[in-house]
Image (cartoon, rainbow, N blue to C red):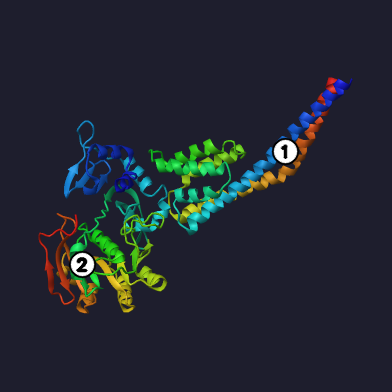
Amino acid sequence: MQNDRFMNVLPRGIRAAVVRERIQYSRLQELRLRAKRPLILIYEGKERIIRNERDEPYVVTKEEVREMLEYVSNYSLYAYEQEMKQGFITIEGGHRVGMTGQAIIENGKVKNLKFISSINLRMSHEVLGCADLIFPYITHRGKLCHTLIISPPGCGKTTLLRDLVRQISDGNEWIRGMAVGVVDERSEIGGCYMGIPQNQLGIRTDVLDGCPKAEGMGMLIRSMSPEVLAVDEIGTAEDVHAIEHAMHCGCKMIATAHADSMEELRKKPIFDRMVAQRQFERYVVLKNREQVGQVGSLFDSRGSLLYRGEAVEACC
Amino acid sequence: MLLRAAGGILVVMATSVGGILAAERIRNQYEQLKYLQKLICLLRSEILYARSYLGEAFGRIGSKARSPYREWMSELCSRMEERTGTAFSGIWENSTGKCLKDAGLPGNELARLADLGNQLGIADADMQVKLLDLYLDELSKSMDELREGMRMKIRLCRCLGVMSGIFVMILLY
């Protein structure tokens, strides 16, 4: 099913070229289209240049970029205005389609993109059970700890968060099933299609799709009274305020943030304050892109190391 | 004599029915434009309030629309789902021509509707709404023009139907 979803947005020529590669879609990480440049796949962490029937590099045309843009936006670019401002659109299945071109600026801010010349399709992978390893560390006497997952882009934060949400919602040997509220600003966690999550998020999960995180957390607390709130890629002061508010409301927080390490995280003033105030009780640091979702280390609120897993796979 | 009289009556009846049908066609054109106006208004609100993408909007509007507009919107949805490389304007134009050619819309309005597809799907939502507003304005003007002459044309068609029958009958005698 998942392969069908992303194949649907590929231009016909590229669709055929990818099929010819005979790859396992579950191991495909990225697909990069650049106008007048060769088509590139990132497969099992390695780059691969796709070749055409004549065994020459498959060169992407401007028309193919336009065609893909039409498919990605369901022929309705106006409906993705907000996403275009951020430079990406999330498609059915939670796959992220990043794009670059010429920015249209209005009042000093990016209003939209035009002359789109590069598209990067980043695959969303649902890895059931990838959070098994960290549950003993993020729960205490059957209770969930406020947890922040940290890693650079492309290391499996969202994959791990998704499985955490699923297991917390369904319950497992470490924790009873809890009502989870997910603010899925970029539709990556649930991969919602017409409001219904396409990924498994558990039986007690409510998803607020496409809503800004800070606003969405408040809405969920007021409307759905979740026991746990999950958000992806926090980074603004508004997000941090909303998280503090949620914690004060008695919700357990599961969030992710971009950083290479705890030290890197503390270099950002808003996170430094959160760490200093010990707002999060656990920090899960993922390690690099060689193996998606590999847990590097796990810390408690004081920064004490609870786990170091150089060779342990958390997911994939 | 009796046979001639019966033949004459039949000729008058046939031409009268022809006149009535022509009158109905004029009335139907107006009704079709009115219905099309309603559908475009629904599309406008789907874009403005729900930010629905076109396929979603066509699916929702089409499910409640009457034939042949239901088939038109269903055709649009399925052609968009196929993703065969045709640009949206092409899909719109083909589907409009195929499904609405016998809908009873005036020829110039059908051409203008087919042309609307060139501007859909692109730009921002505000621009989409403005474009639809512009189309609705023009549609409204066409309807006004049609309505102004409609009553007279309907009467004329009916009269011409009966009169032409009588004229033919006189010629035969």
Badge 1, how many Cα within 10 Å: few under 14, some, many 20+? many
Can you name the residue that lies furthest to the front here?
A173
| Spot occupied by residue A285 in the image (x, y as percentages of width and height) | 17, 65
Q: Secondary structure at mark 2?
A: helix
Disc 1, SS: helix
Q: Is residue A314 left or right of residue B54?
A: left
Mark 1 vs mark 2: give the one in front: 2
Q: Say left or right for B162 vs A293.
A: right
Looking at the rendered structure, the kind of residue marked 2 is Phe
- Side (left or right) of B92 relative to A255: right
Foreground of the two, A146 or A78: A146
Q: Looking at the image, which residue is at 27% across and 40% down?
A: A60
Rendering coords of residue B55 (x, y %): 45, 48
Give above or below for A122 relative to B68: below
- How far apart marks 1 and 2 lie (CA) works out to 77 Å
Task: Check the image and report above or below for A182 versus B101.
Answer: below
Mark 1: which amino acid?
Ala
Which residue does the image show at 45% across and 54% down from the upper left? Answer: B52
The residue to which callout 1 is attached is: B23
Image quarter hosting the C terminus of chain A: bottom left
Residue A177: quarter of image = bottom left
Q: Position of residue A311 (x, y in %)?
A: 10, 59
User: Which of the two residues, A141 or B59, is positioned nearer the viewer here?
Assistant: A141
For disc 2, the chain is A
Checking the image for residue A135, the label placed there is: 2
Residue A224 on image: x %, y %: 40, 70
Residue A33 in which image quadrant: top left
Same chain, labels 1 and 2: no
Closer to us: A291 or B160: A291
Looking at the image, which is closer to me, A252 or B53? A252
Pinpoint the chain carrying mark 1.
B
